[in-house]
Image (cartoon, rainbow, N blue to C red):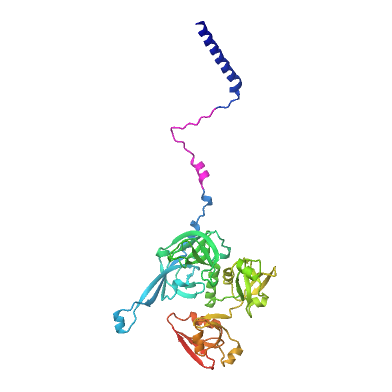
Amino acid sequence: MKKILTLVFVSALGGLLTLGGYKLFVEKDSKPLMVETTADTPVFVPASNYNNVNNNSANTPNFIESAEKSLDAVVHVKNTSIVSAPTSMQDLFFGRQSQRAQVGTGSGVIISPTGYIVTNNHVIKNANEISITLNNNKAYMAELIGTDESTDIALLKIETDEDLPFMAFGDSDNAKVGEWVLAVGNPFNLTSTVTAGIISAKSRDLSGNHSQSFIQTDAAVNPGNSGGALVNTNGDLIGINTAISSRTGSYIGYSFAVPSNIARKIVNDIMEYGNVQNGILGVVGGALNSKAAEELGTTTTEGFYVSDVQEDTGAEKAGIQSGDIINKIDNVKINKFSDLSGYLKTKSPDDVVNVTLLRDGEEETLPVTLLKPSTYNLQNIGMIKNASKKELKKYNTEYGVKISRFDDNYKPYWNKNGIEEGSIITKINGTELYTIDDAKSAITSKHINEALQLEVINKNGEKVVYHFR
C-alpha cells in the first residue's frame, strides 16, 4: 500500500512539473490556434463590393450608340427586273417569248439628308424598277444616278418632303486590323439587322487581278447585306458591305466591304461628272515576296517592284525608274499590289501624291502628278487608247480611238475581217468617239438588252459596222 501511494505521488509531482514548464517556457511564445468553422447561416457580401470586384463592362465594347446612329440610315433595296420565262407550248405555237418579273433584295446607306443612297452595283444591276424602304417602313421609288462596276458601287436618289437620317463617310485609312466593327443591313429580308466583329485584314483582293482592295471582317454578312453599312464603334461609316467568301453562299467567317474612302470618291465623281475619274500612276510591276526578291536580286521582301514605267505618265515625268521599289504613298505603307491600287482609287486625275521608293538601297520621295488613263478595255475588242492626229489622218478621219491590243479570244475574228491592231474605232452605237472617255460613256449608257454596234475602219480604209449581242 505504501508503494502504491508513493507511485501516485511521484506521478502527480511529474505532471505538475510538466505543466509548470509548459506555462513558463512554451505558452508565452506561442500564437493562438485558428480553427475554420462552417456557419449554419449564409454569409451575404454587399452588392457594391461584388460589383467592384467582378464588373468587366469597362473592357467590353459598347455598340449601342453606333447601332442607334446607323439603323435609321440603312435602307432596304428591292430590285425588280424583267427576265425571260421558261418557254411553254403556247409560246412555241405563237412564236413568242414569255417574260416574268424577278425580284432581288439588298441594302443601302443614306449619305445625305436629301435622299442620296449608296449601294452595290450588283444589287441594282439590270433593274427595271428600284424601290427603297426606310427603317420606319416608308417606301419610295428610286432613281439610278450612276454606277461603277469595277468597284461595285452604285448611287441612287429618292425624293422626300423631309430631311432623312444619314451617315457621313468616315476615313477608312484610319481603320485598324483588330478594331471592332458593326455590319448593318437586311440579310434574308430580315430588316434592320446588326452584327458585330473585328477587322480581320485590309487591302484584300478576291479577283486575282489586283482590281479590289476590300476591308475584311468577321462580322456576319449574308445575302441581303450587300450595300449595307460597315460601321466602327464611333458610328462612322468606314465601308460598304459587298461580298462574302463561302462555298455555301452564306456566311462562314469572312466578309468584305468596299472602303469608305473609295466609295466616297466614286460617289463624288458620279455626282460631278456622271462617271468615275481615275488617276493613274503609270507603273507596271508586282508585289515583292521572298521568292520574287531572290529572283530580282534584292533583300527587300515588301513593297511594289516597278518592272516598267508607261510612256507619258506622271511616273515617267517624275523620274520613277524600272527597278525602283515603292514602299509608301502619302505615308500609306505599300506591302502588296492591292495596297497601291486601293489607295490610287481614292485619287483623281491631277492629284499629286508623294511616292517613297527604294533605289539602289537608298530611300527617296518623289512627287507624282496622277493623269487620266490613256487606255480602256473595250468588250469584244480588247485594249483601246486615244489616237494621235497623225494616226487619225492616216485613216482619213477626224475622230476615233485606236485598237492598241486585241483580246486573244477575239483577235482571230477581227484579223479575219481585215481589222488589225492600230485600226480606228469611230463610233459605238452611233456615238462619235474622240477619246476613250467617250467609249466608256457609250458602253455604260447602253441598255443591257441593247446590241453593241462598233463602226471600225479596216485596213482598206472602209468604215464597217459590226453588231454584237
Percent across and percent down for residue 126 are 43, 76
| Position of residue 454 in the picture relative to residue 30 (left or right) | left
Nearer-the-camera pick, 381 or 445: 381
Magenta-drawn segment: 33-55
Q: Quadrant of the C terminus?
A: bottom left
Residue 323's image quarter?
bottom right
Q: How many marks?
A: 0
Q: Is residue 319 above or below residue 465?
A: above
Q: Is residue 102 above or below residue 389?
A: above
User: Magenta part mainly helix, strand or loop?
Assistant: loop
- Residue 47 magenta-highlighted: yes
- Residue 415 magenta-highlighted: no
| Position of residue 182 in the picture relative to residue 299 (left or right) | left
Residue 376's image quarter?
bottom right
Question: Residue at (61%, 21%) from the top-left corner?
Answer: 25
- Residue 157 shows in the view: no
Nearer-the-camera pick, 41 or 328: 328
Percent across and percent down for residue 460 are 54, 94
Percent across and percent down for residue 374 are 58, 80
Percent across and percent down for residue 284 are 61, 75
Residue 359's image quarter?
bottom right
Nearer-the-camera pick, 235 or 386: 386
- Residue 144 shows in the view: yes
